[in-house]
């Protein structure tokens, strides 16, 4: 799926037209045209997402659900439309399986707390991988202290991959859940999620997939994957911040207790007994980020219009071009050289500190991320303080990669 | 010993020659290279200043009258920034360091770097140096 022939990019892929939709790409940083290569942290927003937000607040705003007045009904309809779109986007069976969250971290915490409450006790085991983002480590550690289960970790190989055999060897009759990223935010590695889910299910183990880095790089079909829970963020797929999706199989979500209590998630409240609302509302307590969710629909429409075939091909083309170009710099070391990667290149340039490189590039208008990328265990594994990370989006051009290349040469010269 | 004010003025004058950002950064990087080496025993967690993406270590000696700062960093630019602060503040009395307004930072275009949310930790460095000064002043009085 990701090993595409770079010559196959259809001529209909008009990057100029795509870039036109992102006003921020016309801005300058320190007087230079912006080169935005921090898409793994967050993607920029197309005009239609911003327009939908403005329109919602200017013409359609009211609180949603249960309102009898027109504005409330319009808002509810828009909000629930996004849910239907999310269902189609992830290929879920039913809209009841789509829970709106604040983002991936919120989604992981929701499942972690509800799942641990229901299923995890002392002596049980869960499996994570060494490449997880802190948000897929720390919630489990907090709950471990409360529920007493054990955490097993799939080790990382030198090229930034995990071995399916290593995973298989960790599965025991005590393993209740595997929580793992689809794609590594720090390394770009695409994990063998299908095989992991299959092996886990043969063992009677549930699987939660952190798809934060996957949603804007590859198409996702939760039914084909047969994944139990999957979480992602709107802001990494050209949508608004503070929006996210949690997918869960209906039967599993039915069995889990609510994470947060409050308005909207109840059926009946009395001091004697409170009953909870049906899915998906059971997991959506309080007034949600309505404007964000309404505008998220426009992000789906944007992605639909581009199409994943083109998106994947563009991503792979930029990735190969960038990898080759960066490796031509003397002293370049790429961290994460998995055979299956998406548009993320983590690197170190000689002995230069990533911070220094990041500051010089910033002054040239080039935005990359430096540091540990919320994956300190990966940095420890490779014995490095952090990396420079360039990550690509649908609007990234080869000319921008050339700017990065020239910027790195400049940084190297200034810092040596 | 020159006054803190005079040192700040000198740095402002040095920077005024540079129009280009790159020249300013090269000056900062060069400043870092002039920093006296910090003894290895001070490159530990106890002497580390937090709030920087790179590692910065700061140690302060007090000769009964003045404070002498010694610092290092594993990143060139950060090392240059702490070197600037050492140049300005080292060799002065605790009270002078506590009271000082580091106006040169905004004059040379580093004001935005002083925000506590900046990853370079310049604000943390200044705070740590003033904390040392406060501690030695207290010691002096008691």
Image: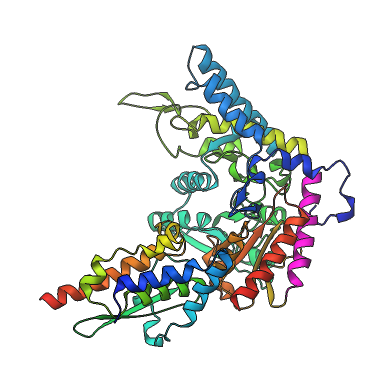
Q: In the image as oriented, which residue stretches furthest toward the left? A: B142
Q: Position of residue A289 (x, y in %)?
A: 50, 33
In the rendered image, the vertical position of residue B126 relative to residue A301, given as above or below:
below
Task: Classify residue A312 as left or right of residue A107.
Answer: right
For the image shown, how many numbered marks are present on the structure? 0
Q: Magenta includes A39? A: no
Given residues B129 and B96, the one toward you in this image is B96
- Corner quadrant of residue A25: top right
| Secondary structure that dominates the magenta span | helix
Q: Is residue A330 visible to the viewer in this orientation of the structure?
A: yes
The C terminus of chain B is located in which quarter?
bottom left
The magenta segment is A310-329
The N terminus of chain B is located in which quarter?
bottom left
Task: Classify residue B20 as left or right of residue B112.
Answer: right
Q: Is residue A93 visible to the viewer in this orientation of the structure?
A: no
Q: Position of residue A68 (x, y in %)?
A: 49, 12
Q: Position of residue B48 (x, y in %)?
A: 38, 74
Given residues A201 and B10, the one toward you in this image is B10
Task: Classify residue A330 as left or right of residue A244.
Answer: right
In the rendered image, the vertical position of residue A330 relative to residue A282, given as above or below:
below
Q: Magenta includes A326? A: yes
Given residues A394 and B67, the one toward you in this image is B67
In the rendered image, the vertical position of residue A199 relative to residue A323, given as above or below:
above
Q: In the image as oriented, which residue stretches furthest toward the top? A: A69
Q: Position of residue B126 (x, y in %)?
A: 34, 67
- Corner quadrant of residue B66: bottom left
Residue appearing at x 32%, y 65% in the figure:
B127
Give the image's coloring scheme: rainbow
């Amino acid at each position: 799926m990701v090993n595409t022939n770079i010559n196959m990019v259809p001529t209909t892929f008009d990057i100029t037209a795509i870039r036109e939709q992102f006003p921020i790409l016309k801005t300058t940083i320190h007087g230079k045209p912006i080169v935005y290569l921090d898409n793994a942290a967050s993607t920029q927003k197309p005009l239609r997402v911003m327009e939908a937000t403005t329109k919602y607040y200017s013409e359609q705003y009211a609180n949603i659900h249960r309102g009898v007045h027109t504005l409330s009904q319009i808002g509810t309809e828009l909000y629930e439309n996004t849910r239907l779109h999310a269902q189609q986007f992830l290929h879920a069976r039913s809209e009841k399986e789509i829970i709106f969250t604040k983002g991936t971290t919120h989604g992981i915490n929701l499942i972690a707390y509800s799942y641990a409450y229901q299923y995890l006790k002392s002596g049980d085991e869960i499996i994570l991988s060494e490449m997880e983002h802190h948000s897929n480590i720390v919630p489990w550690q907090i709950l471990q202290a409360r529920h007493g289960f054990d955490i097993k970790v799939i080790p990382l190989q030198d090229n930034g991959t995990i071995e399916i055999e290593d995973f298989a060897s960790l599965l025991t009759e005590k393993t209740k859940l595997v929580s793992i990223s689809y794609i590594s935010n720090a390394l770009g590695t695409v994990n063998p999620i299908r095989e992991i889910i299959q092996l886990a299910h043969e063992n009677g183990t549930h699987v939660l997939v952190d798809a934060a880095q996957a949603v804007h790089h590859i198409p996702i079909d939760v039914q084909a994957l047969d994944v139990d829970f999957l979480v992602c963020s709107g802001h990494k797929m050209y949508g608004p911040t503070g929006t996210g999706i949690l997918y869960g199989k209906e039967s599993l979500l039915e069995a889990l207790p609510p994470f947060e209590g409050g308005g909207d998630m109840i059926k009946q409240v009395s001091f004697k007994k409170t009953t909870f609302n049906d899915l998906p509302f059971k997991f959506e307590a309080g007034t949600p980020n309505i404007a964000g969710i309404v505008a998220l629909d426009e992000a789906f429409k944007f992605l639909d219009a581009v199409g994943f075939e083109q998106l994947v091909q563009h991503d792979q083309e930029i990735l190969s071009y960038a990898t080759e170009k960066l490796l031509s710099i003397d002293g370049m070391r790429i961290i994460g050289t998995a055979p299956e990667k998406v548009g993320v290149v983590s690197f170190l340039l000689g002995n230069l500190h990533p911070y220094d490189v990041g500051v010089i590039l910033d002054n040239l208008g080039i935005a990359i991320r430096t540091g540990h990328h919320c994956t300190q265990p990966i940095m420890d594994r490779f014995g490095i303080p952090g990396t420079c990370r360039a990550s690509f989006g649908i609007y990234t051009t080869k000319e921008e990669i050339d700017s990065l290349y020239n910027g790195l040469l400049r940084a190297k010269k200034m810092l040596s | 010993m020159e006054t803190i004010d005079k040192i700040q003025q000198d740095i402002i004058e040095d920077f005024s020659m540079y129009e280009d950002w790159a020249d300013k950064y090269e000056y900062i990087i060069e400043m870092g290279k002039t920093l006296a080496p910090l003894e290895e025993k001070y490159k530990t967690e106890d002497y580390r200043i937090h709030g920087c993406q790179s590692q910065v270590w700061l140690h302060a000696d007090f000769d009964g009258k003045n404070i002498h700062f010694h610092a290092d960093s594993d990143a060139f630019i950060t090392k240059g920034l702490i070197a600037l602060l050492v140049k300005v503040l080292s060799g002065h009395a605790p009270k002078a360091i506590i009271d000082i307004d580091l106006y040169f930072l905004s004059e040379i275009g580093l004001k935005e770097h002083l925000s506590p949310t900046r990853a370079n930790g310049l604000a943390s460095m200044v705070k740590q140096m003033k904390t040392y000064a406060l501690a030695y002043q207290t010691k002096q009085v008691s």
